Amino acid sequence: MNLQELRDAARQKLGGACRVCPVCNGVACAGKVPGVGGTATGRAFQANVAALADLKFNLRTIHAAKTPATGTRLFGRDLAMPIVAAPLTGAAINMGGAITEQQFIQAIVNGSRQAGTLGMTGDTADPACFDAGIEAIEQADGAGIAFIKPRCSQAEILRRMRRAEEAGALAVGVDVDGAGLVTMALHGQPVGPKTKAELKELVTSTKLPFIIKGIMTLDEAEMALETGAAAIVVSNHGGRVLDDVPGAAEVLAEIGESVRG
């Protein structure tokens, strides 16, 4: 199977949920939430793509690095590269049911593990999605990080954190940038913003490294640091919750510099 055949098969399987564009830039799928696009005009999704495209490489060929080492270490685990798979869920809700949630998340977790890195699992309106992610992490001997939506009920978050611990997950986190995700509201799963005190309660309720995903400003980066979180993820939820926000790569360097170390 060549690339064109692969694209044609994907287009058929996805049934319009994704156009399988030559370049994934969020234009054709603008406003497709649920779906794979950015919210409203899609400009936030497109800003992510544009901000990343603005970053360029320097070509250097006079050096002694004949066998480059790309490895890094995260929470005590050696990785082959400083890249991890984002927490994606909702094969039925967002992708037209082209594959089952179990097939999807197992491919993410197992594929990441085979590549020498980690897959993250997510949480969505269908409880079966979180369950599938936890099962995938457990079957992969803990080679994964579980993310939980910022549910209005702290008890519901804590219950899911306990499950991640029992599965042997390397770390756990909350994607606070999912606070306005329309798919959760449509299915009666209330989510919302979290106070610093609420996040600190979650951080101190687990022995696992706790990650706060969804930081886009310097002041919230400082607040996240003050909760005792082990790490943050600079993210606007793929441009899927609020229109006309900066691209993540646009603010990454400044935020990283402010909280480094």
Image: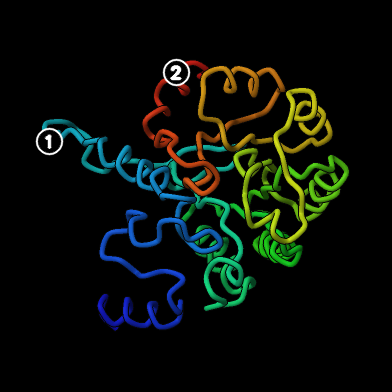
User: Dot 2: what SS?
Assistant: helix
Q: Where is residue 180 in the image (x, y as percent from the top left)?
A: 63, 44
Task: Tell which circle, 2 or 1, labels the residue nearer the N-terminal end.
Answer: 1
Q: Where is residue 120 in the image (x, y as percent from the top left)?
A: 59, 52
| Quadrant of the rendered image containing residue 15 | bottom left
Q: Residue 257 carries which label?
A: 2
Q: Position of residue 124 (x, y in %)?
A: 68, 57
> Residue at the location (42% across, 20% down)?
254
Crowding near the residue tagged with mark 1, few <14, some 14–19, many ≥20 C-alpha atoms within 10 Å:
few
> Residue at the location (64% across, 49% down)?
145
> Residue at the location (63% across, 42% down)?
175
* Left or right, residue 197 beside residue 132: right
Q: Which amino acid does label 1 sit on?
A: Thr
Q: Toward the viewer: 150 or 171?
A: 150
* Left or right, residue 12 beside residue 155: left
Q: Which amino acid does label 2 sit on?
A: Glu
Q: Toward the viewer: 178 or 7?
A: 178
**Number of numbered discs:** 2
User: Dot 1: what SS?
Assistant: loop
* Left or right, residue 202 beside residue 52: right
Q: In this view, does 136 lie above or below 59?
A: below
Q: Position of residue 227 (x, y in %)?
A: 72, 22
Q: Toward the viewer: 246 or 23?
A: 246
Where does label 1 land, which residue?
61
Q: Toward the viewer: 159 or 20?
A: 20
Question: What is the CA distance from the residue labelled 2 to the residue labelled 1?
Answer: 28 Å
| Quadrant of the rendered image containing residue 208 | top right
* Left or right, residue 259 beside residue 185: left
> Residue at the location (71% across, 48% down)?
148
